[in-house]
Amino acid sequence: MRTMLAGHTARTETDFDSIAATALARCDMLAKCSDEPGQITRTFLSPAMERCNRLVQEWMRSAGMITSFDRVGNLRGYYAASSEDALRLIIGSHLDTVPNAGRYDGVLGVMLGIGLVEALAGRRCGFGIDVIGFSDEEGVRYGLPFIGSRAATGTLLAPHLARRDADGIAMYAALDAFQNAYPDVVDAGLDPRARAYLEFHIEQGPVLEHAGLALGVVETIAGQSRATVAFRGRAGHAGTTPMFLRRDALAAAAEWLTAVESAASSMPGLVATTGRISCEPDAANVIPGLVRCSLDVRHADDAIRRAAVEDFLRTADAIGNRREIEVERVVEYEQAAVRLDRTLVALADQVVSEVGVSPRHMTSGAGHDAMIMAACVPSVMFFLRSPGGISHHPDEAVYAEDVAMALRAGIRFLERFEAHLDQLSESERKSCTT
Ligand code: HGY
Ligand code: MN
Ligand code: MN
């Protein structure tokens, strides 16, 4: 069956399989762009990110796109419309990773954006397509997620730029160095003609696999809070200090972690994680004096999440009081839950059913650039099934046939979006100072 795209013909169905294979091969190539040998770790403005960007830029150019870097290192590829000054659809995701990551989180969404342009086979739509590879979504280097999409939506603020990485390099200094190395960077804001944002992403969980579905449609993205809790006790000799005289910071933190885990386990739809912990002086024969724990709390309902965070921090205070341990806690960052655009969700439902998948609305427990972009333009996400439901792990996987399915749905989305453009009036473009 040939898909008509507003007077243009996309490639045949079988071509989607080969474009999907190319997208997956590119994910494999980008997996080699890592800051750490033997694993996939690619962080904000790192040398590995530069190698990754060079490859993606090449692929964008060979797909007929005009490429540019913006001031925060986002890589942009523009595929021109059939007419000058046309409105635009942004298709994006992120190119950075967590430490020891899988090869599809974020990256596949950018490869599918390029793949959709390739599936147009040189034909032009009635709107331009901006494919964006965001420079940082995971927040690994600066502890602040979504640097790329925040810059695009005007929410990367001065206090953020002052944050320092593990080597003490401030974000503004890292950006200065990048802009010196790339003097022709463009502004990081959205083009005023941008009217919608589309993101493809692996689900990173077990729901679609359990339901036997290749694709899902994201309706809501859960809100998240990130905090740091420090337990300050007293370091001491492990051999000479009786147990009753200790102020062991790690024992206090351990009690708190298990209290948080059991409390979170009893709150439906809530997840709480301590993924990072530091212990000083970190010696086997010294009682820990200072322990710092990260805390990541998520829920689709912001009031429930905020109440849970407060509850967990009060629990830390209570444990500290009882153990004569000082507790310093700070909520570093929070992002409200976001409901994606209903009209575009309906459009996504339509194209998913057209490719033979029953539409499944989902809440995403993972954060995505779409939750930031939604502040400026109507946004929509497709999920692809995650075999084994695993992510943020080298075993992260995706089925080639699901990637081809995503391309078929994506081409039909482009077709429908064209007919839909006039409804995305100026009013849809919320006030985004960038
Ligand atoms: O942590 C997250 O939700 C996403 O992977 N950035
Ligand atoms: Mn991730
Ligand atoms: Mn991601």
Image (spheres, rainbow, N blue to C red):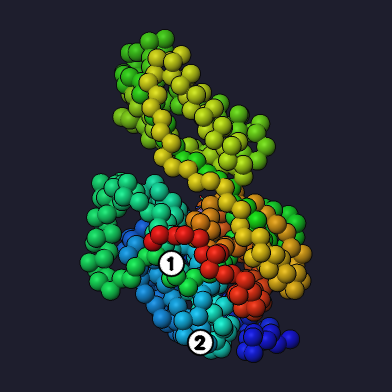
Corner quadrant of residue 45: bottom left
Q: Is residue 367 above or below residue 217?
A: above
User: Badge 1: how crowded within 10 Å, few (<14), some, or many (20+)?
Assistant: many
Between 306 and 73, the residue placed more toward the observer is: 306
Q: Quadrant of the C terminus?
A: bottom left
Left or right, residue 110 beside residue 288 = right
Q: Which mark is residue 71?
A: none
Residue 10, visible in the rendered structure: yes
Q: Quadrant of the N terminus?
A: bottom right
Give me the C-alpha separation between circle 1 and circle 2.
19 Å
Q: Which residue is found at the position 57% from the left and 78% from the top? A: 116
In terms of sequence position, does the residue under pointer 1 or pointer 2 come before the other? 2
Assign a secondary structure to mark 2. Answer: loop
Q: Is residue 206 above or below residue 258?
A: below
Assign a secondary structure to mark 1. Answer: loop
Q: Ligand 3 within 8 A of label 1's CB?
A: no
The residue singled out by tag 2 in the image is: 83
Between 218 and 214, the residue placed more toward the observer is: 218
Q: Which residue is found at the position 77% from the left and 64% from the top? A: 358
Q: Which residue is found at the position 58% from the left and 41% from the top? A: 302
The residue singled out by tag 1 in the image is: 190
Q: Which residue is found at the position 54% from the left and 79% from the top? A: 127
* Three-letter amino acid code of the residue under disc 2: Ser
* Three-letter amino acid code of the residue under disc 1: Leu
Residue 242, visible in the rendered structure: no
Between 196 and 333, the residue placed more toward the observer is: 196
Q: Position of residue 316 (x, y in %)?
A: 47, 24
User: Badge 2: how crowded within 10 Å, few (<14), some, or many (20+)?
Assistant: few
Q: Position of residue 33 (x, y in %)?
A: 40, 66
Q: Is residue 128 above or below residue 251?
A: below
